[in-house]
Image (tube, grey):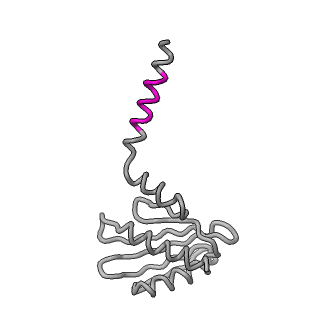
Amino acid sequence: MKAFWMRRARLALLLGLAGALPGCLAAAAAAGAGTGIYLTSRGAESVVNGTVSDVAGRARSVLMSENVTINANSTENSGDKQELKGTKGDLDITITMNREGPSTTKTEVTARKNAVEWDKDYAQTLLNKIVKSGAS
C-alpha cells in the first residue's frame, strides 16, 4: 500500500514540474508541432528542404520582399555554410544556413533589437516564408 502512495506522489511531483517548464519550451513545442520550425533563445530554426544555395536564394528573396537591406553575405566550406545579414528599422537580421544533408539545410533566423532583446516572432515569420517559398 505504501508503494502505491509513493508512485502517486512521484506522479504528482512530475506533473507539477512539467507545468513549471519555461514558456519558451512550450512555445517551441507549439511552433514546431506542425511546421518543423522551432524557437531558439534568439530566433527560430528549421531544417529546410533544398540545398544551401537554393535556400540562400529563397532567403534573399524573402528579405527583399520584406524591405530588409542586405548589407553582408558570406560563404564558407565550399558553399556548405552561407550567411546573410541585413537591417530593417531597428532590427539586425541574420540568416545562417548550414548543409544538413544532400537536399536539406539547417536554417536559423535571428532578428536582434539590441544587445539583449530579440524579435523571435519576426524571425519565425521570416523563416516560415523561406520554408513556404520552397514548397511551391
Left or right: residue 81 compared with residue 66 = right
Q: Nearer the viewer, residue 124 or 86?
A: 124
Q: Residue at x 35, y 82 (%)?
A: 88
Q: Is residue 117 above or below residue 67?
A: above
Q: State which quadrant residue 123 falls in.
A: bottom left
Q: Is residue 5 above or below residue 102?
A: above
Is residue 34 shown in magenta?
A: no
The magenta region covers: 7-17
Q: Residue at x 39, y 41 (%)?
A: 19
Q: Quadrant of the C terminus?
A: bottom right
Question: Percent from the top left, x then y, of residue 125?
Answer: 44, 72
Question: Percent from the top left, x then y, of residue 35?
Answer: 54, 64
Q: Is residue 84 above or below residue 21?
A: below
Question: Percent from the top left, x then y, of residue 120?
Answer: 38, 66
Q: Residue at x 45, y 26 (%)?
A: 10
Left or right: residue 118 compared with residue 38 = left
